Image (cartoon, grey):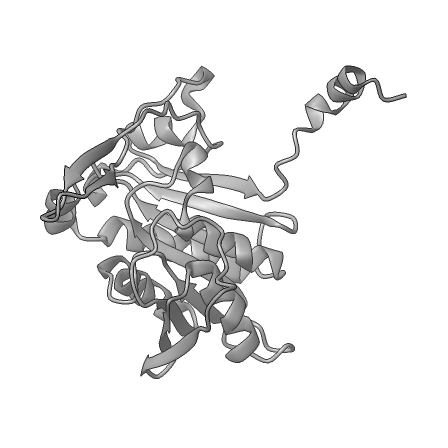
């Protein structure tokens, strides 16, 4: 029986990364695409609860969701486009233009679409293309390396089963290099990014002040044996990190019991 793959992203339905992911998935099964009508980068795992949402058909099995987030796309697709006994075999999200590593995963609309899928019991993978200068890298290399590994990883899931337990997904980052320079795949954990503040103050023609939040540079804490996603990318590997949605700090529960005086 042919496999069914549901695809979304957070860069919008017209993004080149989305088109590349569709091309990579089509040889593996039947593809349905639902993507936000506009860019929703860094929207996190948000659902739209205060306004109606509408699917707009672009072509067969390709829809944009007006005003919707990536999580909306997955949530509503499973309700409106699939029958309960015929849900997709796999959800893939991306290919994001930019990295989703370390704690940035919590901001990411790309990763959050995968989060929504695994909450609904469907295996999911998020794909992101790291770059230093997006216009130069993508112009020179496109998404060829990302397409190659997206297909390899998705095929392994579809053929051999998903390797993780419930409510966990695979977060994949692709290094900004030529295909010939890639060393292969490295299994990693999410690293520890060093954060700063980047916000530019401007004045509009009416004299009103406003801010633009800027992008942060990729700077992180080194880990022993270079085991995190940041190090893998720097070393020219494709990074695959298993991510779980349960963020409870179990190691601190007993400490908190003592702190609060719980008997």
Q: Taking 125 as reference, is 81 above or below it?
A: below
Location of residue 184 in the rendering, given as x and y in whole percent from the top left corner: 35, 39
In the rendered image, which quarter is residue 21 located in? bottom left
Residue 16 seen in render = yes
Q: Across the whole image, how many numbered discs are drawn on residues?
A: 0
Residue 161 seen in render = no
The residue at 58%/61% (across/down) is 122
Location of residue 59 in the rendering, given as x and y in whole percent from the top left corner: 31, 82
138 lies left or right of 251? left
Location of residue 242 in the rendering, given as x and y in whole percent from the top left corner: 53, 41
User: If the image is split into quadrants, where does the C terminus sit?
Assistant: top right
Which residue is nearer to you in this view: 187 or 83? 83
234 lies left or right of 262? left
Q: Taking 44 as reference, is 116 above or below it?
A: below
In the rendered image, which quarter is residue 99 located in? top left
Q: Residue furthest right?
A: 263
In the rendered image, which quarter is residue 57 located in? bottom left
User: If the image is split into quadrants, where does the N terminus sit?
Assistant: bottom right
The residue at 34%/47% (across/down) is 128
255 lies left or right of 162? right
Q: Taking 101 as reference, is 164 above or below it?
A: below
Which residue is nearer to you in this view: 133 or 53? 53
Location of residue 247 in the rendering, given as x and y in whole percent from the top left corner: 61, 37
């Amino acid at each position: 029986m042919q496999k069914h793959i549901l695809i979304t992203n957070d860069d919008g339905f017209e993004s080149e990364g989305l088109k590349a992911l569709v091309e990579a998935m089509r040889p593996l099964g039947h593809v349905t695409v639902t993507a936000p009508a506009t860019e929703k980068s860094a929207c996190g795992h948000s659902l739209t609860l205060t306004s109606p949402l509408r699917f707009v058909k672009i072509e067969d099995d390709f829809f944009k969701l007006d005003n919707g987030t990536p999580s909306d796309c997955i949530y509503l697709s499973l309700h409106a486009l699939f029958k309960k006994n015929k849900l997709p075999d796999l959800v893939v999200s991306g290919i994001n233009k930019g990295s989703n590593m370390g704690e940035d995963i919590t901001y990411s609309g790309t990763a959050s679409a995968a989060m929504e899928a695994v909450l609904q019991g469907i295996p999911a993978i998020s794909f992101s293309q790291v770059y230093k200068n997006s216009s130069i890298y993508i112009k020179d290399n496109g998404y060829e390396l990302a397409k190659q590994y997206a297909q390899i990883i998705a095929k392994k899931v579809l053929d051999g089963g998903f390797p993780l337990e419930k409510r966990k997904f695979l977060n994949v980052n692709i290094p900004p290099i030529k295909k010939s320079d890639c060393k292969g795949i490295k299994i990693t954990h999410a690293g520890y990014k060093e954060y700063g503040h980047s916000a530019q103050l401007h004045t509009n023609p009416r004299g009103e002040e406003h801010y633009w939040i800027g992008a942060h540079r990729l700077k992180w804490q080194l880990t022993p044996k270079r085991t995190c996603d940041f190090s893998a990318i720097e070393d020219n590997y494709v990074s695959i990190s298993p991510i779980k949605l349960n963020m409870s700090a179990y190691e601190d529960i007993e400490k908190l019991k003592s702190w609060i005086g719980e008997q």
